[in-house]
């Protein structure tokens, strides 16, 4: 099987020769700089080049998002909204990704701004949380705008390829659970998911939400609006993927390997792989670091992690 075939099969809970060996979230720049000092060839610059150096399967993750220099909400209409009318996709890059996908060399992952994430990006954290109560019309206005931008982006992308995976960037949780109530989700987030998610699925893509923190309580909210999974499933925030698999057997997951074990030696890493192995065997799950690899992880630590990842990806497929 090739890279794309493995990914699609796993997401469909189908048998594979081995699980895909991927790193869902690329490494911190400080981690990458440490590795250069420890022997990673300095001519390897792109994430794809580094992934292939380690023997990981190739995937392309890209994030089309409206771009504008903005100092605050007051400039939103004049500076930001015009930037949202015409999504920009690099033609040469898109054509390259399309070739790699068609040849089975990579699976394609597109991330888009979500409806909790986007207003916060414009407002800042404090004003955003207060805006659910103080500025509801502004919240809906921004979410109508980012919905329109995302739908236009899907149309443009369809000229080149159909992504294998969509993730919606949100970060709606922290280590004690969601940062908003279900009532707030239903009023300000859900109506826009019900328009965006079907358009993503129409392209034949799996749709997940990207949120840090303990996301367990979000699952029924997201399931109700058509979302199929979550990432990165942070262990230190209390997320338990074995519990999620028990309660939501068809839920897709990416991540979950506790990044804080990666510099603590083989025995500790093996114990962590044994924790997630039952879910690896159950399908619908891509094991990888539960966020970007931290700078405490040496080049040799990471080589060992990749070696163990390959071993357990083969074991899980037996």
Image: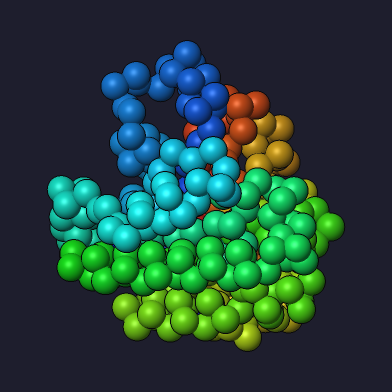
Q: Position of residue 215 (x, y in %)?
A: 72, 64
> Residue 18: x and y, percent?
43, 63
Q: Which residue is at 47% across, 81% downward?
A: 195
Q: Residue at x 63, y 86 (%)?
A: 224
What's the image's color scheme?
Answer: rainbow
Residue 238 higher or lower than 221, as above or below:
above
Left or right relative to 112: residue 253:
right
Name the foreground residue: 311 vs 243.
243
Q: Residue furthest top?
A: 37
Residue 68 visible in rendering: yes
Q: Nearer the viewer, residue 136 or 102?
A: 136
Image quadrant assignment for residue 134:
bottom right
Q: How many marks?
A: 0
Q: Residue at x 70, y 40 (%)?
A: 261
Q: Is residue 286 left or right of residue 297?
A: left
Q: Position of residue 138 (x, y in %)?
A: 60, 64
Residue 280 as seen in the image, left or right of residue 246:
left
Please give left or right for residue 148 compared with residue 75 in the image. Answer: left
* Residue 42: x %, y % from top left: 34, 19
Q: Is residue 267 visible?
A: no
């Amino acid at each position: 099987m090739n890279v794309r075939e493995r990914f699609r099969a796993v997401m469909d809970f189908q048998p594979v020769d081995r699980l895909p060996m991927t790193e869902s979230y690329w490494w911190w720049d400080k981690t990458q700089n440490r590795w250069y000092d420890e022997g990673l060839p300095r001519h390897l610059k792109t994430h794809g080049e580094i992934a292939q150096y380690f023997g990981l399967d190739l995937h392309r993750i890209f994030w089309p998002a409206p771009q504008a220099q903005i100092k605050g909400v007051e400039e939103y209409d004049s500076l930001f909204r015009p930037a949202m009318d015409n999504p920009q996709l690099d033609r040469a890059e898109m054509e390259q990704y399309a070739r790699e996908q068609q040849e089975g060399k990579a699976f394609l992952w597109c991330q888009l701004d979500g409806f909790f994430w986007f207003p916060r990006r414009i407002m800042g954290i404090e004003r955003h949380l207060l805006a659910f109560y103080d500025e509801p019309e502004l919240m809906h206005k921004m979410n109508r705008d980012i919905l329109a931008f995302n739908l236009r982006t899907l149309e443009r992308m369809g000229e080149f390829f159909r992504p294998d995976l969509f993730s919606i960037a949100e970060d709606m949780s922290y280590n004690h659970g969601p940062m908003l109530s279900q009532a707030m989700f239903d009023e300000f987030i859900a109506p826009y998911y019900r328009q965006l998610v079907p358009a993503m699925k129409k392209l034949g893509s799996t749709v997940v939400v990207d949120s840090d923190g303990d996301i367990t309580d979000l699952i029924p909210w997201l399931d109700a609006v058509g979302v199929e999974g979550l990432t990165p499933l942070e262990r230190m925030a209390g997320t338990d993927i074995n519990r999620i698999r028990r309660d939501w057997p068809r839920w897709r997951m990416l991540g979950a390997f506790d990044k804080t074990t990666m510099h603590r030696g083989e025995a500790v890493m093996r114990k962590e792989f044994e924790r997630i192995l039952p879910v690896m065997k159950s399908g619908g799950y891509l094991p990888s670091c539960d966020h970007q690899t931290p700078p405490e992880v040496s080049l040799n630590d990471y080589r060992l992690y990749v070696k163990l990842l390959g071993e357990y990806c083969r074991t899980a497929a037996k």
